[in-house]
Image (cartoon, rainbow, N blue to C red):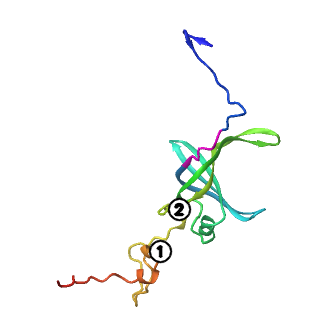
Amino acid sequence: MFINNLEIVFTMATATQTAYAQFNSLTLTGRVFATKVVDGKNGKFLAVTLITNIANDRSVTVTFNDSQGIMALEANGKLPVGRIVTIQGTLDGISETYIKDGAPVMRKRPEVKLVGTSIPRGGLGALPKSETKRVIAGTPVKVGTPVSDLTPESAYSDDAASAAVAPVDEAPAPF
């Protein structure tokens, strides 16, 4: 084919060429839109849908499944609808349509499907206002003996018992 005296050559993939996956990883931040525990053929898993804005007034839904860590978060009530979450995963597909009664139907928002999804450290964001408990000024506070709770840093420590103890300033050793 010639256009403006330039030869344009089209090549087609043949049966001998294979298109391998590029393992496109994504990191996205969005709000939990829906969670549902599903009993599948390989056991229970959590189906999660996030919603994230890609531009003003343009959003996409992000779907993924999990049967371990994220499912445990949901079981403990730490993944309510509306919570901001950062996730990392490998792109598995993107769709704007689905089939209903044999006919294609446009989705309200495009859907991005991820596999191998995880929440990185620090990926759990703000809770929705309905889930937060705020202490206002003037609220009576009980005074008593302090309870030795684990500090947030101790959750990442291998030795949680020693991490719960406050550090003590020590004088440097004499020479």
Q: Residue furthest right?
A: 101
| Dot 1: element | helix
Q: Main secondary structure of the magenta part?
A: loop
Disc 2 packing (10 Å; few <14; some 14–19; many ≥20): some
Q: Seen in the image, is 141 located left or right of residue 30?
A: left
Q: Residue furthest bottom?
A: 145
Identify the mark nearer the N-term, 2 or 1: 2
Q: Position of residue 38 (x, y in %)?
A: 73, 62
| Dot 2: element | loop
Q: Which residue has dot 1 on it?
A: 155
Q: Position of residue 101 (x, y in %)?
A: 82, 42
Residue type, mark 2 in image: Pro
Q: Position of residue 46 (x, y in %)?
A: 67, 62
Q: Residue furthest front?
A: 16
Residue situated in front as seen by the camera: 78 or 10 = 10
Q: Residue 135 falls in which quadrant of the image?
A: bottom left
- Say if the magenta span includes residue 22: yes
Task: Tell me: residue 6, above or below residue 39.
Answer: above
Q: Quadrant of the C terminus?
A: bottom left
Q: Quadrant of the N terminus?
A: top right
Q: Which residue has dot 2 on it?
A: 128
- Say if the magenta span includes residue 36: no
Q: Which residues are magenta?
A: 19-25
Q: Residue 7 falls in which quadrant of the image?
A: top right
Task: Tell me: residue 87, above or below residue 44.
Answer: above
Q: Residue 172 falls in which quadrant of the image?
A: bottom left
Residue occupying the point 52% across, 43% down: 54
Residue occupying the point 42% across, 77% down: 151
Task: Tell me: residue 68, above or below residue 4.
Answer: below
